[in-house]
Image (cartoon, rainbow, N blue to C red):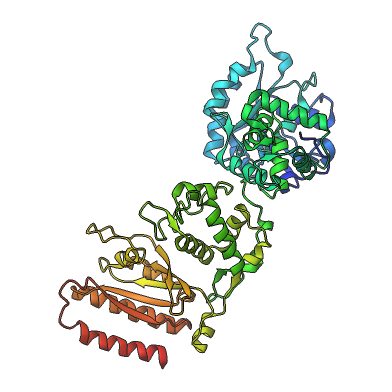
Amino acid sequence: MAKASAANSGPGGKTGVRIVVCGEKGTGKSSLIVTAAADTFPANVPPVLPPTRLPEDFYPDRVPITIIDTPSSVEDRGKLGEELRRADAVVLTYACDRPETLDELSTFWLPELRRLEVKVPVIVVGCKLDLRDENQQVSLEQVMMPIMQQFREIETCIECSALKQIQVPEVFYYAQKAVLHPTGPLFDQESQALKPRCVRALKRIFILCDHDRDGALSDAELNDFQVKCFNSPLQPSEIVGVKRVVQEKLREGVNERGLTLAGFLFLHALFIEKGRLETTWTVLRKFGYNNDIKLADELIPYSAFKRAPDQSVELTNEAIDFLKGIFELFDADDDNSLRPIEVEDLFSTAPECPWDEAPYKDAAEKTALGGLSLDGFLSEWALMTLLDPARSVENLIYIGYPGDPSSAIRVTRKRRIDRKKQQAERNVFQCFVFGPKKAGKSVLLNSFLGRPFSDNYTPTTDERYAVNVVDQPGGTKKTVVLREIPEEAVAKLLSNKDSLAACDIAVFVHDSSDESSWKRATELLVEVASYGEDTGFEVPCLIVAAKDDLDSFAMAIQDSTRVFTFLVMVLYK
């Protein structure tokens, strides 16, 4: 199905690979390096070699390699640590004729790599294979399996002989391959299965290649896929062979229309099991994925998000229309809401559901069964676009947005211009909610999302968002985002001179039955309003008396008049 192409130079954007060789003294590090570079065993080698470069045409991926030899003495451990931290891969040596050097791998070297936080592939190499005692013939798999189970960072193990020139080039080929085509992001060695993020990326690629949307890749679609990824077509006999291999192992992998998604995933798992990781990585990279199996930065139009502090980013009508269609498509039971399982299905071609964690989790109104109405669905997208437009556009691409990504978003007019003209062209408005502890801020947000009141008090320690659609006179709709600021977070917020630039209105909540709550709310109001004046980002302010079912204290109305007099002075002087 896949044929290697020499045109794929620099996989993953790598222009070079730095391999650091380390291990116990006398295990053959320097001889291994010289033999690999010169294709001959050296009569004499210095204790530590200078950096050795293998040219780009040394291996098929055409990426040059720099090999760093390292000292083994205790007094040189500092220098060793510096080199290891700069490594793309580590070759860790032991001597086949000295079992104690093998033991040192798990008692010192591998723990030392972890201590130094060296998180790169490790290739374990048994050198001096020609000197091993013939009476101690134990398979490499038997020896290394317990170590590899304990240290999952080991990519592969190999034995070699520099003297006899046995498997010397393979050592650095495997090290380079582990960097350019890493196993970790694709495959779980323990479960022997593709990792979830890899499955989701391959599912998206399958859907993009299934042009007639019939759930299978026809012979023509398979051939188009092959040409796109590997620049060479498949012969009819090769297509038959591919489908036969799949069908023999996985009956549901092929149907009368062609190769199914299950079969497509099976093929990639098979490639990886057979060590052909470069095949799956070539496919992923052709469709814009990086080593984290996320879209590469160059596919996200970051320049389209440039904005002044008092500008925001919103979805365009084109993007909203697309999302309405997606909502209808994934509403499998036609109940006008997306249940959690339907939301997960919708984002099954993204690395993960972007709304599973704060600030998006539970930020929108839910139906009685925990689903999202169309308004709730669009509200989540509006919030994500406001807070993280790059992530919003990225996820639009994952779920199949067909247009130019930059056409999905627009930057709004500056807020100070809106206020001067007393007219806003924006569709999404952000409200900062301030107030002392136990004033009722969280209850206000919950009420905004249609959630019932609860007597249980849970203090808000982190900022929280609530977003909903608000109907306007004339049938228009606007999206309102409430951002709850915990009392202890106000000082940090106001330490940033642009902190109020994104605020359309500031709300100050107080417990109407508690005089101290009122006083603290007014202090916060004065503090925020004054800061807005000082920084040039004045905001309208609104006081909200919560817990109105309780008795209000006597001075509240009189004091509120004084506060609003101050506000008028600040905002309109």
Task: Give the position of the N terminus as an image quadrant.
Answer: top right
Q: Nearer the viewer, residue 291 or 166?
A: 291
Q: Residue 250: which quarter of the image? A: top right
Q: Is residue 505 left or right of residue 111?
A: left
The answer to whether residue 307 is visible is yes
Query: Is residue 339 positioned above or below 158 on the image?
Result: below
- Residue located at (52% from left, 38% from top): 115
Query: Is residue 418 positioned above or below 405 on the image?
Result: below
Residue 97 horizontal/vertical position (percent): 66, 15
Q: Is residue 57 left or right of residue 281?
A: right
Query: Is residue 121 positioned above or below 461 on the image?
Result: above
Q: Nearer the viewer, residue 509 or 121?
A: 509
Q: Is residue 165 left or right of residue 317?
A: right
Q: Residue 365: which quarter of the image? A: bottom left
Residue 446 horizontal/vertical position (percent): 33, 63
- Residue located at (82% from left, 42% from top): 231
Q: Is residue 443 left or right of residue 421?
A: left
User: Hey, which residue is sitting farthest top in the picture?
Assistant: 135
The answer to whether residue 64 is visible is no
Task: Give the position of the C terminus as an image quadrant.
Answer: bottom left
Q: How many marks?
A: 0
User: Hey, which residue is sitting farthest bottom in the picture?
Assistant: 573
- Residue located at (55% from left, 69% from top): 314
Residue 384 horizontal/vertical position (percent): 51, 62
Residue 161 horizontal/vertical position (percent): 75, 20
- Residue located at (38% from left, 56% from top): 367
Q: Nearer the viewer, residue 451 or 201?
A: 451
